[in-house]
């Protein structure tokens, strides 16, 4: 594919994606502000460990090293920085180039307002990774779960849509979605429940699901998201073929008990995953909790659906950011 491709914000997920692309024959520039990570990638290549194990030579740049125009830029920075980042990147985007929003939350509308809807492609990532030292990134999802979902705001095909799909298929299967907003909300449901609790409690998704106290909170967070979507007229799409609403929603005690039992099974392929929000907290950085749990709470207020557990996650994470709390399992008691 003779195009210029970049992954901007090549942290844990971006480095893994770029390494798979290079391994399978597609050159891509990995761009990151973290100079130590860039230098490690240049010196040693991308070392992908965890559920896979390989090292791949890659091209790594800082934003200051960028030049020329790109046909496709995969956007993998935190969503809260999008206004500044997207305005910066549009000067490096070819006239028919596209930004592919591989972020948490619901970033496509804001991005399209800056670069235009035909130049905006949404992509939901169904796997996770953790940044280590020295250019190493640990893939924490099982190899059979390395999937993507693609789409656009309106459902119309954007520029380079098929090219983006082909690039992603160098790593794993790609599902093209007509109801991409529903896909975004399905990913938001998982992140609000498991990433939110992983950040609050300082543990992996599997550890959140294993403990009955934290699992009850996860169940409530899932229910809040489902109820918010139902009141908003949003149809939540299946995740990797699993209809989460049918499996995990409940309206009676028996279905609630079944839902509670199914939660650890539903997340088992991602049990080793540690939320990127938790990784940020451990590094003393601000998180994107307002773009994840905060979005569910805000939509709940719009449609009159209470989200007390989601509100509590936002509160706890902000208290950790402020140094009032630490991300530790005892915080589960704060949910009452």
Image: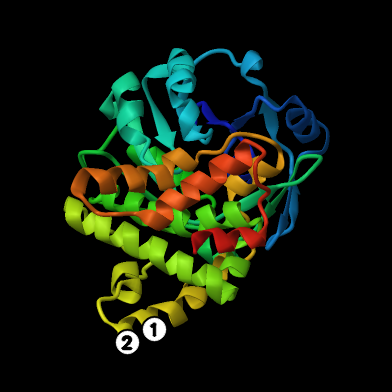
What SS does tag 2 mark? helix
Residue 77 appears in the picture as rendered: yes
Residue located beneath label 2 in the image: 254
- The image shows residue 266 at horizontal and vertical percentages of 47, 73
- The image shows residue 47 at horizontal and vertical percentages of 76, 47
Above/below status of 148 relative to 15: below
What SS does tag 1 mark? helix
Which residue occupies the foreground of this view, 158 or 330? 330
The answer to whether 270 appears left or right of 308 in the picture is right
Tell me the residue at 74%/53% (across/down).
Answer: 54
Tell me the residue at 32%/70% (across/down).
Answer: 243
Residue 23 appears in the picture as rendered: no
Residue neighbourhood size for the residue with mark 2, other residues' Cα within 10 Å, grouped as few (<14), some (14–19), many (≥20)? few
Residue 280 quadrant? top right
Residue 44 quadrant? top right
- The image shows residue 215 at horizontal and vertical percentages of 51, 71
- The image shows residue 165 at horizontal and vertical percentages of 40, 45
Disc 2/disc 1 C-alpha distance (Å): 5 Å
Which residue occupies the foreground of this view, 73 or 162? 73
Which residue occupies the foreground of this view, 136 or 72? 136
The answer to whether the residue labelled 2 contacts the one labelled 1, judged by CB atoms less than 8 Å apart, is: yes
Residue furthest to the bottom in view is 254
Above/below status of 51 relative to 250: above
Badge count? 2
Tell me the residue at 32%/87% (across/down).
Answer: 254
Residue neighbourhood size for the residue with mark 1, other residues' Cα within 10 Å, grouped as few (<14), some (14–19), many (≥20)? few
Tell me the residue at 44%/53% (across/down).
Answer: 192
The answer to whether 253 appears left or right of 219 in the picture is left
Which residue occupies the foreground of this view, 65 or 194? 194
Residue located beneath label 1 in the image: 257
The answer to whether 50 appears left or right of 112 in the picture is right
């Amino acid at each position: 594919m003779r195009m210029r491709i970049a992954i901007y914000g090549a942290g844990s997920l971006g480095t893994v994606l770029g390494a798979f692309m290079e391994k399978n024959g597609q050159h891509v520039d990995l761009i990151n502000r973290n100079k130590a990570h860039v230098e490690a990638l240049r010196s040693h290549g991308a070392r992908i460990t965890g559920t896979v194990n390989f090292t791949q030579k890659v091209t790594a740049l800082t934003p200051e090293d960028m030049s020329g125009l790109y046909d496709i830029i995969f956007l993998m920075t935190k969503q809260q920085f999008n206004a500044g980042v997207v305005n910066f990147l549009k000067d490096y985007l070819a006239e028919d180039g596209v930004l592919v929003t591989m972020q948490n939350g619901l970033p496509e509308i804001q991005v399209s307002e800056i670069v235009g809807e035909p130049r905006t492609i949404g992509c939901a990532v169904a796997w996770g990774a953790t940044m280590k030292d020295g250019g190493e990134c640990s893939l924490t999802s099982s190899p059979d779960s390395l999937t993507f979902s693609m789409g656009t705001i309106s459902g119309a095909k954007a520029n380079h849509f098929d090219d983006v799909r082909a690039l992603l298929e160098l790593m794993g299967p790609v599902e093209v979605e007509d109801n991409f907003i529903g896909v975004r909300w399905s990913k938001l449901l998982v992140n609000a429940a498991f990433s939110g609790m992983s950040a609050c409690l300082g543990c992996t998704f599997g550890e959140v699901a294993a403990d009955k106290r934290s699992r009850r909170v996860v169940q409530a967070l899932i229910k809040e998201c489902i109820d918010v979507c139902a009141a908003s007229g949003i149809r939540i799409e299946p995740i990797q073929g699993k209809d989460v609403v049918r499996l995990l929603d409940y309206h009676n005690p028996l279905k609630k008990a079944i839902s509670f039992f199914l939660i650890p099974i539903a997340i088992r392929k991602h049990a080793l995953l540690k939320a990127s929000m938790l990784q940020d907290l451990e590094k003393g950085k601000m998180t994107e909790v307002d773009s994840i749990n905060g979005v569910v709470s805000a939509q709940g207020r719009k449609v009159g659906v209470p989200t007390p557990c989601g509100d509590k996650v936002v509160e706890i994470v902000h208290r950790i950011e402020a140094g009032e709390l630490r991300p530790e399992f005892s915080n589960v008691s704060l949910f009452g």
